[in-house]
Amino acid sequence: MDKLIIEGGVKLKGEVTVSGAKNAVLPILAATLLTDEPCVIKNVPNLRDSNSMFKILRSLGKIVEFDKGKVTVCAGKTSNYIAEYKLVSTMRASFCVLGPLLGKLKKAKVSLPGGCVIGVRPVDLHLKGIKALGAQINIDSGYVEAKAKCLHGAYIYLGGVYGSSVLATDNVMMAAVLAKGKTIIESAACEPEVADLAEFLIKMGAKIKGHGTPIIEIEGVKSLRGAMHVIIPDRIEAGTMVLAALITEGDILIKNVQYHHLGALIDKLKEAGAHLSYADGSLHVKGNKRLKAVNITTLPYPGFPTDMQAQMMALMCVTGGISVITEKIYPDRFMHVAELNRMGAHIQREGPHAIVEGIKGLSGAPVMASDLRASACLVLAGLAARGKTSISRIYHLERGYEFIEQKLINLGAKVWREKE
Ligand code: EPZ
């Protein structure tokens, strides 16, 4: 296993282009299971998670080719409806093959994804939704087995104790597009990645309205055709690069950004005194002074994204004040707190809150990545810290940030890899 070494203290300067959105690519690749015709997906980032989904699709009978950001998915000689534990356990998001398998084949056997360090990660809303569409469900030996003579439209309230669910909305939408009749999903997730999936399904011939809002209406159709789609930019990578500019007091032009996808983050950063300007799809960020501490509460989109919570905590470590960070989506998503404290941060955990007392500066140290966004947080902290930071288990980082080292090196960062 590799570790990432960062010599901190460099002000990052230059330009960086954001890659395609991981959390749009994964369900859109799963959606290719809804047709036997070829599909072409462009702007696909070369990530561990993208490659995991390619493997899952191949295990389900698809022929998948990936070259320079373009994926072509065609039907193979046979199709399979079983998504194995050994594949699903490497990436929870694989669970989003359940809906399209059920929609297309009227049967699916998908391993339960299990939890991860950020939380238990239940799938009750996924199952509630597909049951409402007429599926019989049996859970046996760690697998969900679902089958249906035919799927029928339904009114489904999909809100959970933590609000809406991104992948449950995706799964239900992908089962409903081939159901007989009309489906209404109430309390649907509004994330841009859900809307991007719906746009792809519409290109395939699905009839969907209201995507990107809490009420999605789907009129089932008999079959779907192949389609071509270009993935939206990754708003979480964009947000992470914004914080890299601010935490190093650098000056970065971030290209391929959808400004309106970053509303909550930009609002908070402006409250903290950051200078950001947007023109022609690019965001210019100039970090020039210690920012004010601000309080953060994570919420479903368009609220402050939980996937930016860890990265924002790194920035709040070096402001001039106290920041209270409340995690409402995954109350345990604080594995990065102990690692930041190893770097000299003053953070206290109180249940779903982390109280961050800003300090003058962090100091480099050996730290360990625990999940994708915690590893991004530690990279940001390492870029700002005095001295050297070594981050072990960086396979977490490789799941969701395409060519991240090269992008940072191009901005002047002193970053390299060493064997563990
Ligand atoms: C998606 O996960 C993202 N992953 C996550 O990003 C992101 O953190 C999350 O949405 C929230 O925005 C992908 O899109 C591949 P949820 P998902 O269902 O869909 C609870 C990253 O770093 N819940 O929206 O699995 C759940 O426990 C990853 O890129 C239920 O209670 O998340 C959580 O508290 C991490 N029952 C809340 O809902 C269910 O059936 C939101 O989870 C499903 C979820």
Image (spheres, rainbow, N blue to C red):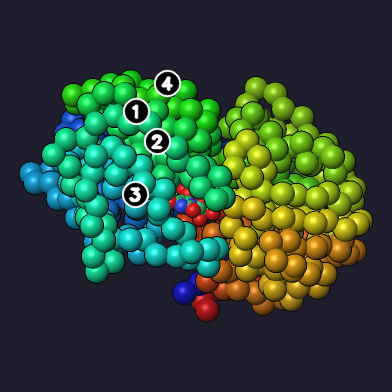
Residue 317 horizontal/vertical position (percent):
81, 61
Crowding at dot 1, Cα within 10 Å, few <14 / some 14-19 / many 20+, comes out as many
Mark 2: which amino acid? Ile
Residue 61 horizontal/vertical position (percent):
16, 48
Q: CA distance from mark 3 to mark 4?
A: 23 Å
**Residue 19 versus residue 113 in the image, above or below:** above
Q: Which residue is disc 4 drawn over?
A: 209
Looking at marks 3 and 1 on the same chain, the residue that comes earlier in the sequence is marked by 3
Marks 2 and 3 close (CB-CB < 8 Å): no
Marks 2 and 1 close (CB-CB < 8 Å): yes
Viewer-nearest of discs 4 and 1: 1
Give the mark count.
4
**Residue 42 versus residue 344 in the image, above or below:** above
Mark 4: which amino acid? Lys
Marks 3 and 4 close (CB-CB < 8 Å): no
Crowding at dot 3, Cα within 10 Å, few <14 / some 14-19 / many 20+, comes out as many
Q: CA distance from mark 2 to mark 4?
A: 15 Å
- The disc placed on residue 156 is 2
Viewer-nearest of discs 3 and 4: 3
Image check: 240 left or right of 163?
Answer: right
Residue 182 seen by the camera: yes
Looking at marks 2 and 3 on the same chain, the residue that comes earlier in the sequence is marked by 3
